[in-house]
Image (tube, helix red, strand yellow):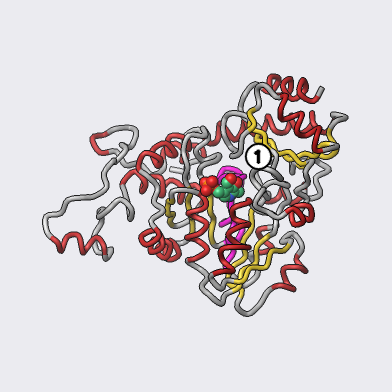
Amino acid sequence: MKEKSFTTKAVHAGRYTPARGVVPPIYQTATYAFETAREMQDIFEGKSEGFVYSRVGNPTQKVFEEKMAVLEGGESAKAFASGMGAINAAVLSIVKSGDHVISDRTIYGSTYDLFTEIFPRLGINVSMIDLSKTDELEENLQDNTKLIFCETPTNPTMKLVDIKKISQYHPTTMVDNTYMTPYLQNPLELGSDVVVHSATKYICGHCDTLGGVIISDAEFIERTHQLLKDFGAAMSPFNAWLLLRGIKTLTLRMDRHTANAEKVADFLEEHPSIAKVYYPGLKDHPQHALAKSQMRGFGGMIAFEMHSYDEAEALMRNLKLCTLAVSLGCVETLIQHPASMTHAAVPKEKRESLGLTDELVRISVGIEDIDDIKSDLSQALD
Ligand SMILES: Cc1ncc(COP(=O)(O)O)c(C=O)c1O
């Protein structure tokens, strides 16, 4: 039988169906019973299969991990309570005090905070650079550089990083694939070593749970398991179940998000109140060719600049269908102001230098009828 398509794998991969349920159960237990103490020890040491304690592993969470590993094309995956939990564990599985990290400087606000505030306090030195420029990367590489980290497209400015290019260098490369999902981009296939996701976003799809996941080879995931065990940022069985339900429709949703976003980007580009639109699907996006080569679709995220902060504020205040909220990847269209909301943690001077201006607005285009989205934007812009 030929290999199943991504869409089929998104529905079927990682089946665990005791009592022949088509849908895996929510395995709502904190602990598990044993016949003998030895039995538990064998599971703990990996000599036999089973579960010991749900902070360290749970059947529903395991189905989610198996599905994500299949979809990203990795050997194994580890689930966490949130995207930040996954990013923390993934980075700290690689670096220790005295090591150096290179990160793209346009990244989600809390990851930026982690790299510029928290890790330096632990003796981990991080260079925040523009990873779309190979010469900047080469200038900043050091003997103790252990990790290169990026998001692509970046949150929120929609700049791309060439995954193949950065993966040619010796440090471990890690890509936050939240914006694209494994349906539209597979960093491991492009040479990256580790992929992380905020599963809270498109993987979930319905804005009703938090989750995070790391996908890589089996040896790396085993290392992250130690951090899960000792940090304790475990995914709850119920959240794993909601995520499993969400993933089944991932491809349908992403196709619709993308189709709608392409039309919204065209609409915004032609509107006189909009100064600039950032969407990799637009032919005038400076990295449109790279987008076509490393992504299978342009996704549902758009950033745009208005002519002034007051106009941006008035637009968001006057929308009736699109919801003013942080987060992204939900079926509902969400709009927000990065400088005062998701990226408020980035100091103002830094924000300006990253293109995170006060006029910038980010929209996560939902799956509603495109005419309704456009008409809401249109009345608010008027
Ligand atoms: C690109 C990206 N990575 C990571 C995160 C953090 O994920 P979580 O909120 O699930 O911790 C976010 C949150 O918005 C994000 O946008």
Looking at the rendered structure, the kind of residue marked 1 is Gly
Q: Which quadrant holds the C terminus?
A: top right
Tell which of 107 and 132 is nearer to you.
Answer: 107
Residue at 41% of width from left, 49% of height from top? Answer: 65
The answer to whether 82 appears left or right of 287 in the picture is left
Question: Does residue 182 belong to the magenta stretch?
Answer: yes
Chain part drawn in magenta: 172-192
Q: On screen, 352 above or below 302?
A: below
Q: Quadrant of residue 238?
A: top left
Residue at 62% of width from left, 45% of height from top? Answer: 179
Could you tell me residue 196's position as x and y percent? 53, 54
Q: Which quadrant holds the N terminus?
A: top left
* Residue 198 visible in the picture: no
The residue where tag 1 is placed is 299
Structural crowding at the residue carrying mark 1, measured as other residues with C-alpha within 10 Å and reported as few (<14), some (14–19) or many (≥20): many
Could you tell me residue 219's position as x and y percent? 42, 66
